[in-house]
Amino acid sequence: MKKIIIVGSGFHAKVITDEIIRAKKYKILGYIDPFKKKGNPIKPFYDKLEMLGGFEYFNKKIDFEAIIAIGSNHKRLAVYKKIIKVKKNIKWAKIISKDAIVSKNLEIGEGSMIISGSILNIDSKIGNHCLINTGSIIDHDSYFDDFSGTGPGVRVGGNVKIGKVSFLGMGSNIKHNITIEKNVVIGSNSFVNKNCLKNATYFGSPAKKHSSRTINQKYL
């Protein structure tokens, strides 16, 4: 059984821990979090799993894979940049829930996470370090660029393009043949029927541009 470490110890780490344990493919060594004390157990997750320390742990000569279990696309990207400064040639895991339905003819990049109840259809592509959250549906020939993701219950039509670090809020619906450029946030329960330009927040039904946004700005 391969070994894995989980980067982060917040609520999303709790979800990823559960997915890893249920999949029975990895032995979890513990959590990396520079803001938590080494050795302290993570409660109320799993008392036997401990904090391993900060990013310096990546210098240890242990054969393991890693996953950045952080829900925010921008924070996940920021942590990734810090980690590769310590060690570039890290083995990144892919976490695919045993309860997800994923086409065999579909590409999923390293470090990405597909959560329970999601359905990913044929000839779609999920980039690196993406998050497809609980119960999301991605139809055929769609593309998620690196560090992009969905909230729970998102529905994406066929031939949709999602740009880098863009986020589709919980319950949003994206019409087929739509392009959402990089660093875009779509508000919860929105219906997107037109292309969305980069660095902006959109919401409503139909979704309209609400404001411009910077790369590190909170979602809404």
Image (cartoon, helix red, strand yellow):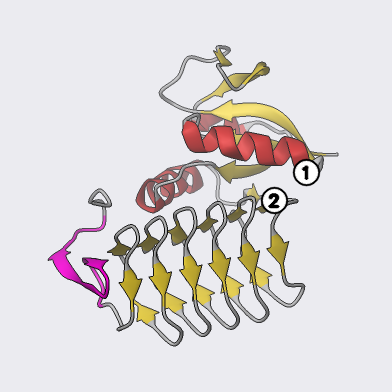
* Residue toward you, 19 or 193: 193
What residue is rendered at 13% in x and 64% in y?
211
Q: Is residue 72 above or below residue 212?
A: above
The residue under label 2 is which amino acid type? Answer: Ser
Q: Position of residue 169 (x, y in %)?
A: 37, 57
Q: Position of residue 35 (x, y in %)?
A: 40, 23
Mark toward the start of the polypeptide (2 vs 1): 1
Q: CA distance from mark 2 to mark 1?
A: 7 Å
Residue indicated by mark 1:
23
- Magenta region: 197-215
What residue is rendered at 39% in x and 64% in y?
172
Label 2 neighbour load within 10 Å: few <14, some 14-19, many 20+: many
Can see residue 127? no
User: Is 123 one of the magenta-colored residues?
Assistant: no
Q: Position of residue 219 (x, y in %)?
A: 28, 52
Q: Secondary structure at mark 2?
A: loop
Q: Is residue 172 left or right of residue 20?
A: left
What residue is rendered at 56% in x and 18% in y?
44
Q: Which mark is residue 106?
A: none
Which quadrant of the view contains residue 192? bottom left
Q: Are marks 2 and 1 in contact (CB under 8 Å)?
A: yes
Residue indicated by mark 2:
97
* Residue toward you, 200 or 193: 193
Which quadrant of the view contains residue 185? bottom left
